[in-house]
Image: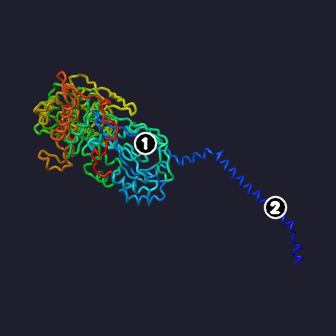
Amino acid sequence: MSDRQSLRDPRQERRQFAWRALVMALVVVGLYGAMAARLIYLQVIDHEHYATLSHDNRVHIVAVPPPRGLIYDRHGVLLAENVPSYSLDVTPEQVPDMARTLEALKSVVALTPDDIRRFRQTMRRKWPFQAVPLRFDLSPEEVARFAVERYRFPGVDIKARLRRYYPFGGAMVDAVGYVSRIDVAELQKVDAENYEGTTHYGKTGIEAYYQTRLHGRVGYDQVEVNAKGRQIRVLSHQPPVPGDDLILSLDAGLQSVAEAALEGREGAAVAIDPRNGDVLAMVSAPSYDPNWFVDGISSKRYAELRGNDWRPLFNRALAGQYPPGSTIKPFMALAGLNNGVVTTDQRIFCGPYWQIPGDPAKRKYRDWNRYGHGMTDVSKAITQSVDVYFYRLAYQLGIERMHDFLSRFGLGRQTDIDTTGEMGGLLPTPAWKRRTKNTVWYPGNTVVAGIGQGFMLATPLQLADATAALSMRGERFRPRLLRAVRDPVTRDVRARPPETLPAIRLKDAAYWRAVLKGMRNVTQRPDGTAYRQFRGFDYVVAGKTGTAQVTSHIHSDNAREGTIPYRLRDNGLFIAFAPADHPLIAVAVVVEHGGGGDVSAAPVARRMIDYYLKHNTELRNGRLVLKSNLPTQLDLQPTEPRDTATRAPATGDAS
């Protein structure tokens, strides 16, 4: 026992203990020193950085999209407005389980598969911590139900928005167009910063063409939020700059009259003020309600529109390309006169048919009148729409001279009107036929082109534009829809001057008189092709009827309209301007499968002319003059959104 005790060295043990205690003390002091240094670094050296991070967890910068500019007609009537609505927005970064949240939301608000599909598409292209709309235009009942259940859905909230609304529905869609949800391709074309928070974008018409003007500049709110991301208060506000308000050349009343006149038929009508190129009406029938597209049209409804045999989504006024038929004859007459092929007083015998000289096949190009018209001058040829006269005239002119002259009226190319979706029509040439058909041009092609058949195509807008130039004896203006702009800040209305185009000069003013006389007689003389439609009319109208065959092999002298399948019936056309001596309106109407232009298209034009002149003119010094000028600030309806309870609800499913 004493030996074991002698092995212990208390002094050595005390030294070891002291050493270990010192090491531990140094470690503790070092740890405390490191902690103190870290605290000094965080709170002193890097204080600003971490204070900013902390601030950003509490304070968010929220984009405030600008109110979209309003769209008015020429009299200050609202065509596109913004109305208050509520949307259900989701901030994905604040949602713990997206699938479960979406499923649970179905018991609170109505959600369709289309809503969820569009939400997921938008979610993939959004900015960080940006709220994504899940449902637009919630009903008051849905807003109330969500308010009660709100605590169950972190990252989901109700947001008040201004929703685009078109009070005239389908009556204006062909000119005004519509907005819908913005997509990836559109985001790539714009300034991403200025479109932060923007959910809609112009898709067609004026809404698309003037998207930049209508959009405005984005604003920002600095908001304080709680731990769940809910907004507590707004710390600062940089207001957005609203988009410009646009005043169009359209007359809402005339547009509605044209739509009603075409109801139940396929076709288009365009009216232009020939003195400045203002498009007064532009209608395509049948139409559709643009309000269906604003917040996303359902797949079912869109499929119904796409599958409709009457093609309501097709803008016939701009993109419909039709053989102009006999409406081309006044322009052909001018071409013949100006090129010296015929004279104003020259009379030609016009029988029931005409044959190309030296044609071995001796093909007969028949007149619409089986008995012919006898001795005919240029004015009579237009008044009675004498096919034989224009067969001969076209053959003598040749297709190249026809092309060169008709193109001066804007036929065969786009008018470059300020909207989207315009097609250019077609003035054929031998080179075009070789390039597209890989075959030669035949004399018969020229002959039928003389009455607006064959390969020749024109849009209703082109026909109205050419008619306007004809009424003004060659003075031309580019067709336009935008008439003026109202500044969103100063509220000043700035008029947009018309754009003049190169005038059409003829060798002799008598050529204009001869052709316009023939067009006047179309409606004023008993032998005129539209006399029955305009007999007793309050205004003197100059016009020209047209009938364009859809197919040529089924017609015969004994064919009856009722025996021909609808889709194979002729298209009816009519061009006109009024008053004939000092035109204020030029009109072109196409009625698909309507038969003769005198019975199908001319009545539409009559209703349009009657409405416009009665509602927009007054008699001054014995002459009709327009009584309406550019609306001033006081004439325009207020920019504040109207109460949704006072507006007619949008028809159809807008989900």
Q: Residue at x 25, y 49 (%)?
A: 310
Residue 48 visible in rendering: yes
- Disc 2 marks which residue? 19
Residue 157 located left or right of residue 50: left
| Secondary structure of residue under mark 2 | helix
- Where on the picture, by quarter, is residue 179? top left
Q: Nearer the viewer, residue 54 or 399?
A: 54
Q: Residue at x 16, y 30 (%)?
A: 539
Is 527 located above or below residue 508 in the figure? below
Q: Nearer the viewer, residue 65 or 295?
A: 65
Disc 1 to disc 2, how far (Cα)?
70 Å
Q: Are marks 1 and 2 in contact (CB under 8 Å)?
A: no
Mark 1, residue position? 65
Q: Residues within 10 Å of mark 2 (few under 14, many from 20)?
A: few
Question: Residue 469's image quarter?
Answer: top left
Residue 444 visible (yes or no): no
Above or below residue 635? Residue 567 is below
Where residue 471 appears, as percent x and y from the top left, is: 23, 28
Name the mark nearer the viewer: 1 or 2: 2
Which of these two is toward me, 647 or 371? 647
On the rendered image, what quadrant is the N terminus found in? bottom right
* Comes first in the chain, label 1 or label 2: 2
Secondary element type, mark 1: loop
For badge 1, the amino acid type reads: Pro
Q: Position of residue 176 (x, y in %)?
A: 31, 40
Q: Characterize the local packing of mark 1: few (<14), some (14-19) or many (20 or more) Cα atoms within 10 angstroms.
A: many
| Along the viewing direction, whichever of 136 and 293 lies nearer the viewer | 136
The x, y position of residue 60, in whole percent, is 50, 46
